[in-house]
Image: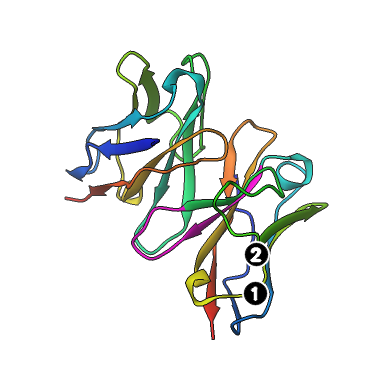
Amino acid sequence: QSALTQPASVSGSPGQSITISCTGTSSDVGTSNYVSWYQQHPGKAPKLMIYGVNNRPSGVSSRFSGSKSGNTASLTISGLQAEDEADYYCNSYTTSSTFVFGTGTRVTVL
Amino acid sequence: EVQLVESGGGLVQPGGSLRLSCAASGFNFSNYWMNWVRQAPGKGLVWVSRIKGDGSRTTYADSVKGRFTISRDNAKNTLYLQMNSLRADDTAVYYCGKSDWIDPWGQGTLVTVSS
C-alpha cells in the first residue's frame, strides 16, 4: 500500500492554469474509476473536489477538473485564485479493496 | 445538513488503547460505507479503514491491521474505531468520512501516543 506519487509543490500566478499529477500503479489508479481529489486548507478538514475521476460535487467551482490516463490521474485548476492556495491530495481505490492517498501537493499562488 | 462529529481522542501511553466515536446526522447512516482517515502532525492523509453500511464488510490499511477494529451502531448513527497496541507513529488527527468519496469529513480528533 504505497502512497500515490504527487509533486511536493506546484505554483502559478493568478489567472493561470496548473495541473497536479497523481501517479500510481495498475493495482490502483490504472484500474480504478474511484479516483478522487481533496483540498485541505491549514488547520481545516479536507474537502472533496473531484470524484469518479472527473466529476465535480455540487458547489465546487467549474475551474476544477479531473482526468486520468493509464496509471496517472490529474487535477487541473484553471483561472487560479488566491483562495485555491492549499494542499491537494488524490485518492484511489485499490485491487486489495482498500484506499490509498497521494503524498500531497502544496499549491502556491504567486 | 450532513454532519459528522468525532470524539474520544486524547493522550495515551504506548501499548495502550483508545476508542474513537463519530456521531453522524443528516443522512441515512445505515446506507453508506464509512471511513477513518488519519493525518500525523505536518504530514499527509492516510486511509485507515472502512466499513459497509450494514457492518458486514470491513477493510484495513496494513499499518493498523490486527490492532484497530472498525465498527458501527446503526441504531445510534455512530461509527467507532477501537485502537489497541498503540504506537508513537499512530499519533495523528483521526477523521471520519462518509461514503467512497469521503464527503463530508468530520472536524477530526487528535490522538497522541506518548509516555
**At x 38% / y 21%, what residue is drawn?**
B71
Please provide percent x and percent y for residue B38: 40, 47
Residue A63, numbered circle: 2
Secondary-structure class at tag 1? loop
Please provide percent x and percent y for residue B95: 38, 43
- Chain letter for mark 1, please: A
- Chain letter for mark 2, please: A
Q: Residues within 10 Å of mark 2 (few under 14, many from 20)?
A: few
Disc 1 with disc 2 on a shared chain: yes
**Where are the magenta residues, as a range?**
A35-46
Q: Is residue B13 visible?
A: no
Q: Is residue A68 left or right of residue B86?
A: right
Label 1 close to label 2 by CB (< 8 Å) = yes
Q: How many marks?
A: 2
**Image colouring:** rainbow
Q: Residues within 10 Å of mark 1 (few under 14, many from 20)?
A: some
Please provide percent x and percent y for residue B22: 32, 32
